């Protein structure tokens, strides 16, 4: 699919996304679709530069919320909508950074929110083992708005797990030989878990 796109077309798409020129981005997508018979979604999935950056990387890294929304809209109503959209959202560049990594590093809160709402993976690590929260912390420190957003999201997920999640999962699990040491002498916390596979 990528072989159907010329280098100039890829450059034009990436540049339009980088500067937030939605009219040019739309016109370029339409021209490529007419020439190749590919859908805009297929074009966006294929359009990557030599560092594997996508139009989403360019738009998110520069804080262009309207461009991000436009890019994601091209995945709506397709047969493989969710699968393709997630592949686009979580597409890594050569350093395994996603668009969410770039938005977090740039401190673009509204873009971060839109990506998370769309289903971007918040726990995906780059090649240095950093998740988007780590990059936001590098930029903003602990009190930054993007950092606070990620921590709030993590807290909400924690609450969802607390409502029956882990509690129900460990119910009935105990330690075999609890209260007995190696020689049956009453040391606590030793033994093997019961009910485990």
Image: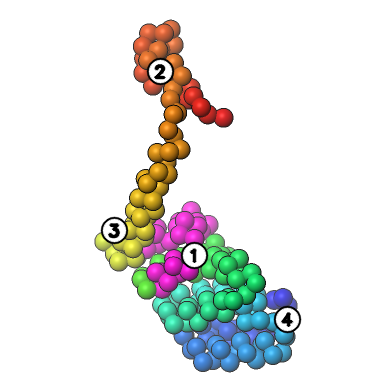
> Residue placed at 54% from the left, 62% from the top?
96
Question: Residue 167: x percent and y percent?
Answer: 40, 39
Query: CA–CA distance between discs 1 and 4?
Result: 29 Å
Q: Residue at x 33, y 58 (%)?
A: 152
SS at badge 1: loop
- The quadrant in which residue 76 appears is bottom right
Is residue 97 in the magenta section?
A: no
The mark that comes first in sequence, 3 or 1, is 1
3 or 2: mark nearer the eye: 2
Using the image, tell me which numbered label, if any, was put on residue 65. Answer: none
49 and 22: which one is in front?
22
What residue does disc 3 label?
Answer: 142
CB contact under 8 Å: marks 1 and 4: no
Q: Pick whichever of labels 4 and 3 is earlier in the sequence.
A: 4
Look at the image and tell me in which quarter the C terminus lies. Answer: top right
Answer with mark 1 or mark 2, whichever residue precedes in sequence: 1
Mark 4 falls on what kind of element?
helix
The earlier-in-sequence mark between 3 and 2 is 3
Q: Is residue 48 left or right of residue 70?
A: right
Q: Is residue 29 above or below residue 164?
A: below
Judged from the image, the secondary structure of the residue bearing numbered disc 3 is loop
Q: Which residues are magenta?
A: 111-136
Q: Which label was assigned to residue 119? A: 1
Q: Which label sits on residue 4?
A: 4
Q: Which residue is denoted by mark 2 in the rendering?
A: 178
Q: Kindly report the distance in space between the C-alpha atoms of the residues bearing marks 1 and 2.
A: 43 Å
């Amino acid at each position: 699919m990528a072989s159907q796109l010329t280098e100039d077309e890829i450059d034009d798409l990436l540049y339009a996304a980088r500067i937030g020129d939605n009219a040019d981005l739309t016109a370029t997508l339409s021209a490529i679709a007419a020439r190749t018979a590919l859908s805009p979604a297929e074009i966006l999935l294929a359009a990557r530069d030599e560092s594997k950056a996508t139009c989403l990387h360019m738009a998110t890294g520069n804080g262009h919320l309207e461009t991000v929304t436009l890019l994601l809209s091209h995945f709506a109503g397709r047969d493989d909508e969710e699968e393709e959209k997630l592949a686009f959202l979580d597409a890594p560049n050569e350093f395994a950074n996603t668009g969410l990594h770039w938005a977090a590093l740039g401190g673009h809160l509204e873009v971060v929110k839109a990506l998370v709402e769309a289903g971007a993976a918040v726990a995906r690590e780059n090649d240095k083992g950093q998740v988007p929260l780590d990059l936001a912390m590098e930029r903003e420190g602990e009190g930054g708005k993007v950092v606070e957003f990620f921590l709030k999201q993590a807290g909400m997920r924690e609450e969802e797990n607390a409502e029956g999640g882990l509690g129900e999962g460990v119910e009935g699990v105990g330690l075999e030989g609890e209260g007995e040491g190696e020689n049956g002498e009453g040391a606590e916390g030793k033994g093997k878990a019961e009910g485990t596979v």
